[in-house]
Amino acid sequence: MSRPANNDKMQKWEIIIRNQQESKLSAEKWCLQNNISIHTFKYWKTRLGLVLKRSSFIEIETSKPTEFLILECNNVRIHVDSSFNGSLLQRCLIAIKAISC
């Protein structure tokens, strides 16, 4: 059985987790940049019950033009090639909305 964490430690990890979420970087990339163990980060995120609460798509900026589009919502990424199937994309978006909203 796990022992209870003190409030200071819980507050510290809540701030860390929120900082990662606000950065819009993946947890792995953010933890690497901030010298935090990804395993410890995921443990605390699960323990505190914090869920990523993005309710809309975010724009992913690129430095050069691309032949594809990346859509991200609720920690799900969809890479859309320039020759994408519109009905398939629509079905994917409907499925994501049903799961996350």
Image (cartoon, rainbow, N blue to C red):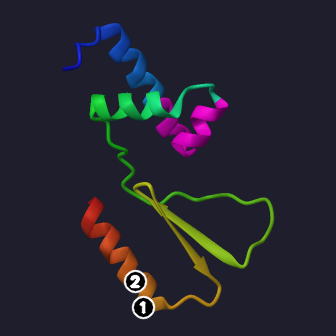
The answer to whether residue 19 is magenta is yes
Q: Name the residue at 31% across, 68% down.
A: 97
Magenta residues: mostly which secondary structure?
helix
Residue furthest right as drawn:
64
Q: Which residue is pictured at 31% across the width and 74% down the height?
A: 95
Residue 3 position (above or below residue 71): above
Does dot 2 land on a helix, a strand or a loop? helix
Residue assigned mark 2: 90
| Residue interval drawn in magenta | 18-33
Q: Quadrant of residue 44?
A: top left
Where does the image place residue 49, in percent across and percent down from the top left? 27, 34
- Total marks drawn? 2
Specify the quadrant of the image occupied by residue 30.
top right
Q: Is residue 97 magenta?
A: no
Query: In this picture, is 36 found above or below 79?
Result: above
Question: What amino acid does circle 1 point to?
Answer: Ser
Res. 3 image quadrant: top left
What residue occupies the far left of the structure in this picture?
A: 1
* Circle 1: element type: helix
Which amino acid, by three-letter code, is at mark 2? Gln
Question: On screen, 88 above or below 20?
Answer: below
Question: Cβ–Cβ below 8 Å for labels 2 and 1?
Answer: yes
Query: In the depicted view, which residue is nearer to us: 29 or 64?
Result: 29
Q: CA distance from mark 2 to mark 1?
A: 5 Å
Say left or right for 6 vs 76: left
Instruction: Tell me the tag on residue 87.
Output: 1
Indicate whether 58 appears above or below 91.
Answer: above
Work out which quarter of the rendered image holds the N terminus and state it.
top left
Please provide percent x and percent y for residue 85. Answer: 51, 91
Q: Residue at x 68, y 58 (%)?
A: 61
